[in-house]
Amino acid sequence: MKKGVLSILLLFLTVLFCGCQREEASPEQRFLTLLSCLNAEERTAVYSGQDGADKRREGLERIYRREDAFEVFSSVESYGIALSRRGDGYEIHMLLSRHPSDDETVKGVLRGRMELIQRTDVEGYLGEEYAERIASARIYTRGRYHFLLVTEDNLRAMKEIDGIF
């Protein structure tokens, strides 16, 4: 009996946190919910639009390897970036374009990051698993939300995105 009640409570909490924050939550909160649903909070360092301006400029230029990254991000209303702390190549980028006319600019930023990580000789440097993850990187769009997914299960990540965003 106790196991049944506990199972129902656990199911309720999972649905609550992984699928029910669609309209009320900010983009950053939704991003953190996505990381939680993918069990990625512990393994990643997170950067978001809530960081201070100096930290944002430095972080964006370093991550995207573009000196104009901060200026290009004027097309971005909100963002969340999760980078692996383990050096295993796990990354999730969420960029919300300010306007539908900014979508191609925003996707271009993500394509640039994907090309940057795919150009690196990752197999010789970090091993085959990392190389496979990089090779399977995907850009996924849901409305004005654009994602770069470099995970071990991009399909699961896309399903979670569909439920959260």
Image (spheres, rainbow, N blue to C red):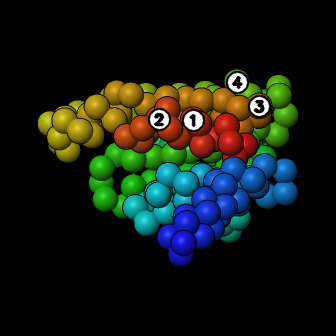
Side of 76 where 155 appears, left or right: left
Query: Where residue 154 is drawn, which disc sits there?
Result: 2
Q: Return the residue nearer the eye: 165 or 13.
A: 13
Residue under label 1: 158
The quadrant the N terminus occupies is bottom right
User: Mark 3: which amino acid?
Assistant: Gly
Say which residue appears at 53% left-offset and 40% top-offset.
157
Residue under label 3: 143
Residue under label 4: 104
Residue 140: image location, x then y, percent: 60, 29
Do the CB atoms of the residues marked 3 and 1 lie less than 8 Å apart?
Answer: no
Do the CB atoms of the residues marked 1 and 2 lie less than 8 Å apart?
Answer: yes
User: Mark 1: which amino acid?
Assistant: Met
Q: CA distance from mark 2 to mark 3?
A: 18 Å
**Precedes in sequence: disc 2 or disc 3:** 3
- Specify whether residue 112 is in view: no
Which of label 2 and label 3 is nearer to you? 2
Say which residue appears at 82% left-offset and 40% top-offset.
98
Residue 6: image location, x then y, percent: 56, 71
Q: Return the residue nearer the eye: 9 or 101.
A: 9
Q: CA distance from mark 1 to mark 2?
A: 6 Å
Side of 147 where 144 appears, left or right: right
Which of label 3 and label 1 is nearer to you? 1
Q: CA distance from mark 4 to mark 3?
A: 12 Å
Which residue in the rendered view is the most extreme toward the front? Answer: 1
Q: Secondary structure at mark 1?
A: helix
How packed mark 3 is, by other alpha carbons closer than 10 Å (few <14, some 14-19, many 20 or more), is few
User: Mark 4: which amino acid?
Assistant: Glu
Does residue 139 lie above or below 150 as drawn?
A: above
Say which residue appears at 77% left-offset and 31% top-offset.
143
